[in-house]
Amino acid sequence: NATTRRDVQGNVIGVVGIGQDITGRRAQEREYTRLIDTANAPIFGVDTEGLVNVWNQCAMRLVGYCTNEVMGHSLVKEFITDDYKTAVQAVLDRALQGAETENFEFPLITKSGMHIEVLLNATARRDE
């Protein structure tokens, strides 16, 4: 935060800034990111628009798409089979509203066009 500093006549004579040490928080964020990226289960995330914003190494190996090939793309529209698009979108919508879903099975489309069955546990991700 920063605010102006004024003299008795109201003239600006400087700025006062207040800082906060966020070193520990940044280290926790890096550790969290590392844990997600190296997990032995496919982990993917979407933003409130349904666009992929998390895609870990296991998801890469399983589905065949590199992170840069999926980031910012619609998970449901591009990587879910037509017969499951509505159901998967409903699960994601419920998660975004705070309702968790456990053990929901659906097929993902791999880069080679194969369909693989995935067991999904969906929950909202919140900034803390």
Image (cartoon, grey):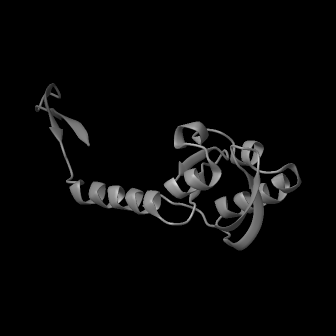
Q: Residue furthest top?
A: 11
Comparing 114 with 50, the one in front is 114
In the displayed structure, would residue 81 be above or below residue 102?
A: above
Locate residue 18, reporting x and y percent: 19, 46
In the displayed structure, would residue 73 be above or below residue 75?
A: above
- Position of 34 with respect to 77 (left or right) is left
Locate residue 99, reporting x and y percent: 68, 69
Which image quarter holds the C terminus? bottom left
Locate residue 70, reporting x and y percent: 60, 41
Q: Residue furthest bottom?
A: 102
Q: Which residue is rendered at x = 15% and y = 32% of the image?
A: 6
Comparing 119 with 61, the one in front is 61
Which image quarter holds the N terminus? top left
- Position of 53 with respect to 84 (left or right) is left
Locate residue 122, reporting x and y percent: 65, 66
- Position of 28 with respect to 82 (left or right) is left
Q: Which residue is rendered at x = 71% and y = 74% of the image?
A: 103
Q: Which residue is rendered at x = 41% and y = 56% of the image?
A: 33
In the displayed structure, would residue 99 be above or below residue 54?
A: below
Q: Total label count?
A: 0
Comparing 81 with 116, the one in front is 116
- Examine the image and state in which quarter residue 112 appears: top right
Q: Residue furthest right?
A: 83
